[in-house]
Amino acid sequence: MNPSLIIAKKRDGHALTREEITGFVHGYTRGQIPDYQMSALAMAIFLRGMSVQETADLTDAMLQSGVWLVWSRRDRPLVDKHSTGGIGDKTSLILAPLLAACGLAVPMISGRGLGATGGTLDKLEAIPGFRTNLPLAEMESTVERVGCVITGASAEIVPADRKLYALRDVTATVPSIPLITASIMSKKLAESLDALALDVKFGSGAFMKSLADARLLARSLVDTGRRMGVRTSALVTDMNQPLGRMAGNLVEVHESLWTLEGRGPADLWDCTRELAAELLVLAGRAGDHQSARRLLDEKLASGAALAKFREMVAAQGGDLSRLPPMPLGSEVPAGRAGFVLSIHTEQLGHAIIELGGGRKVMSDTLDHAAGLEMCVRIGDRVEIGQSLVRLFGPADQLAAVTSQVAAAFAFSDQLVPPLPLIVERID
Ligand code: URA
């Protein structure tokens, strides 16, 4: 195989064969193909795109670069959910135990914050003692015993993505639909799932800013999942404002607990319940979405989902009795009256990073108590001086962040309609 001929083929807009893709990815993972040739191929893919078949072949080649989970017992459907990320997106913390309480098995491999978006592992680490680096064997035994687990990817899972993602990050090749698809799907397929639900977010706090791009990504993810034998569907959901009220780490754990106790914000429960309903239907545990929603409401109301969450946390070493209380907040007042027209949600994510709740460089340690609470949503009427946001963080950072957060809001004198949360379902 001559790597430069494969690069030239893609550069000129031709489809690559399965053998060419596999040879390239495996050569790169083993160190036989250097970074500069992989960068050139990634840029050619970024510029020329890939067909559904090529994207599936790339996903499979990345998956085959490492190990995948082998389940000794398959007496329950294995399911998972993946979100493309946003601010305040804590659905995983609620969905995994909720579905385990419905009798499904949820082996969730999650990530850390990326750019301005939060990460599930960072949130769970706000719980004293919670371990997010379970070895594969412990991950498997926890799923078999408890029904769910949320942990990080070990080094043996999809090593090609680990290497390629770092390269894409510094070669301006992250926002490519086939590359994102292969990166996400290879990691999820390594869980050996029966069904997968995707939450593809669009808007000011999402990776995909436009609904059109989110639709394309959702279609690509669903097509690839199906082509690889996993029942897959996607919801395209709004991220023009944070999901729920809380964004950060500790504060999102508190909000997840409130939601599991049945007193969380409506948008967070709606988003979680719709994704969970997708999985119950895909896994054949509910005949339709309506009966799936009824089952989920029942598991919430009975306390079964909350009990599962407590069981999962304990199994992973976490101690909820030592969870720090909600921190004290500092208000960001509205500088004018009006209807909330828009929120630059990514800017809120950057404000959380400034407060210490996210990383500027990989080696940063987090202040888990840092974050914010949304006091208003798009469409709300506010008066001058009314709180827009409550900030949690060190006193010396609050002044700078307060003006940054206030600047993220735009107002209108006209009535602004609330935004729909779940915009489309793609299957
Ligand atoms: N998340 C991933 O895991 N990979 C991407 O390429 C983008 C988002």
Image: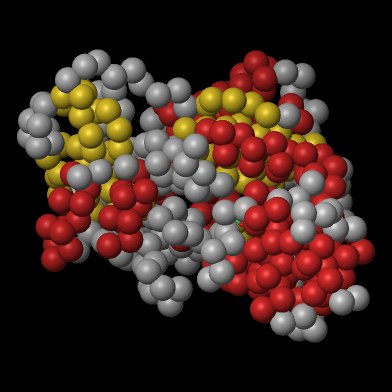
Query: How has the structure been colored for display?
Result: secondary structure
Residue at 49% in and 56% down: 119
Q: Estimate the x, y position of residue 380 in percent, counting from the top left.
A: 25, 23
Location of residue 187 by image quarter: bottom right
> Which of the two residues, 104 or 227, is positioned nearer the viewer here?
227
| Screen quadrant of the N terminus | bottom right
> Which of the two residues, 214 or 237, is positioned nearer the viewer here?
214
> Which of the two residues, 66 or 282, is positioned nearer the viewer here?
66
Residue at 61% in and 34% down: 215
Residue 82: tell me if it is visible: yes
Q: Estimate the x, y position of residue 84 in percent, counting from the top left.
A: 56, 47
> On the rendered structure, is 353 left or right of 156?
left
Quadrant of the rendered image holding ligand 1: bottom right
Location of residue 76 by image quarter: top right
Residue at 17% in and 63% down: 397
| Screen quadrant of the C terminus | top right
Q: Estimate the x, y position of residue 335 in percent, counting from the top left.
A: 9, 37
Q: Residue furthest front?
A: 12
Give the total of numbered labels.
0
Residue 315: tell me if it is visible: no
Location of residue 425 by image quarter: top right
Residue at 82% in and 54% down: 14
> Which of the two residues, 340 or 397, is positioned nearer the viewer here?
340
> On the rendered structure, is 201 left or right of 79?
left
> On the rendered structure, is 379 left or right of 261?
left
Q: Estimate the x, y position of residue 375 in percent, counting from the top left.
A: 24, 35
